[in-house]
Image: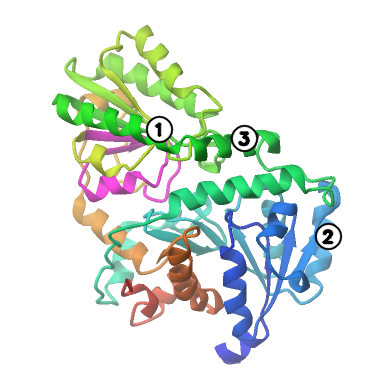
Amino acid sequence: MSEKASQNQKHFVFLQGPHGPFFFELSRTLMASGAKVTKIGFNQGDRHYWRDAKTYVPFADAGDQWAEFFKNLLGQGITDLVLYGDVRSHHKTAIKIAEIHNVTIHCFEEGYLRPYWATYERGGVNGHSRLMDMSVGDMRKSLAKIDETQPEAPARWGDMRKHIFFGAMYHWHVMFRNGKYPHYRPHRNLPVSREFWHHFKKLVGLPIHSALRFAATRRLKRSGNVYHLVLLQLSHDASIQDHSDFESTSEFMDLCITEFAANAPRHHHLVIKAHPLEDYRIPLEHLAHKMADQHGLADRLHFIRGGKLAELLDYARSVVTVNSTAAQQALWRGLPIRALGNSVYSKPEFTSNQPLGEFFAHPRKPDLNAYRDYRRYLLATSQVSGGFYARTSRVRLARQVVDMVLSDRDPYDLLLQSDAAPVQQLKLVL
C-alpha cells in the first residue's frame, strides 16, 4: 500500500493538547489530506478551543469509565492517537490501550531546544523518548547519511504572553462553564479556580515583574561576581513528578543551596532563576533566602523571577538543573551542566556526573563537538521550528509538522532509513 493511500485511510483521535487552538488548526490540515479526525474533550476548556462540533466528542463520565470509553472508540477504526505530553492519567491509559491495538502514538511537547522549536515524537517524550536509549555514537551514524545546513533561530519570538493568556482563558471556561462535565478532575492537584487565579495574577503582574527582573539582572551583571546558575522548574510539572526523584522544586533548591554552601569557593555566588511560568503558589523566593540565611549565604544568593535566560548564561560559571530543556542553551555556550533528573540530553560526553558539591567546586566542561552533533541530530529529526501559542509560530509549526504526522515512519527512523534529511527540517523559513 502506498503512503498516499494509507494517509487517506487514517483516522486521528486527538486528546488534550497545549492551551490554545494549535491542535484544532493541525486537525484542519490533516483533514485536507483526506484523513478523518475526532477530538475527545474532557472539559469546557477543551471544547472552547475546538471549533468544530461535528468532530468533537465529549467525555463527561467518571474517570474510571475512561478506559472502556477509549476501547470502544478504537473500534471505530482509529489508526492514530495525538496528544500533548504523555503522563496525564487519561493519556497514560490511552497510550497503553493504543499500544495493544497497534495505534500510532503521536506525542507533542515543548521543544527540547526551546523556545524556537517544538518537539514531535512517536510513542513518548522526555523520559519516555527514544532519545533516552540513543548514544551520541548512534546519532553520528545517522548524521553521516546527510549533509544539511543547521536552521537558525528567528530574531524574535512571541509565545510567552500568548501561553499565559491561553492558559487563563482555558481555566476560566473550566471554572465558569463546565456544567456538562460534572466528573472532570484536573490532572494537577489544585482546584481549577486556583489555577485560573494563578494564571490571571501572572498575566496582570507581567509589567511589574518584568521591571523587577530587569533591575535584578542588571545588578548581577554589573556586580562582577562569579556565579553558578540554578534553573528551577515547576513543581507540578511532569519533569519533576515523573522524571526525577524530587518531590518538589523547593526540595531541589534546598539541595543546591546546601551543597553550594559546603563546597563552592567563598567568593562564588549562587543565582536561582525561577521558571518563566512560575506562579509562586509556593513562596520560592522567600524560601530561597531563608535557606541561604541558614547556611550563611545571605550575601551570596540571588533570586531572579523568570524571564529570558540568555543574559544570565552569558556570565555564568556553571548550570545546575533537574532536567530543564533550558540547560541546552547553556550547553550551546559550552557551560558545564549538572542535571539531577532523567533528561534526553543526559549523555556522558556533555553532562557531568560529578557529585553536586564537587561540581560546584570544580565543574567539568562538556565535549562541545559531541553536543553539536547531538543538537544537529535533534534538528534533523524531532525538533520542528515553530511553537504552540503565538499565531505566526503556530502556523509555522503546523505547516512543517503535518507531513511528519502523516508519514508511516517516525522522525528518527525516517533519518536512519533515508539518504537525506527530512526536507521540512533543513531550512527555517522566516
Q: CA distance from mark 3 to mark 2?
A: 32 Å
Give whichever of discs 1 and 3 has the lower sequence position. Answer: 3
Residue 173 image point, x, y percent = 71, 49
Amino acid type, mark 1: His
| Magenta stretch, residue numbers | 317-345
| Left or right: where 424 falls relative to 354 | right
Residue bearing the label numbered 2: 69
Amino acid type, mark 2: Phe
User: Pointers 1 and 2 in contact (CB under 8 A)?
Assistant: no
Q: Badge 3 local density, few (<14 within 10 Å), some, or many (20+)?
A: some
Residue located 57% across and 90% down the image: 4
Residue located 69% across and 58% down the image: 48
The quadrant where residue 210 appears: top left
Q: Which mark is residue 209?
A: 1
| Left or right: where 42 falls relative to 426 | right
The quadrant where residue 21 appears: bottom right
User: Pointers 1 and 3 in contact (CB under 8 A)?
Assistant: no
Q: Nearer the viewer, residue 302 or 202?
A: 202
Q: Please say whether residue 404 is visible from this viewpoint.
A: yes
Q: CA distance from mark 1 to mark 3?
A: 17 Å
Q: Nearer the viewer, residue 316 or 47?
A: 47
| Left or right: where 7 falls relative to 351 | right
Q: Which mark is residue 259?
A: none
Q: Badge 1 local density, few (<14 within 10 Å), some, or many (20+)?
A: some
Residue bearing the label numbered 3: 197
Amino acid type, mark 3: Trp
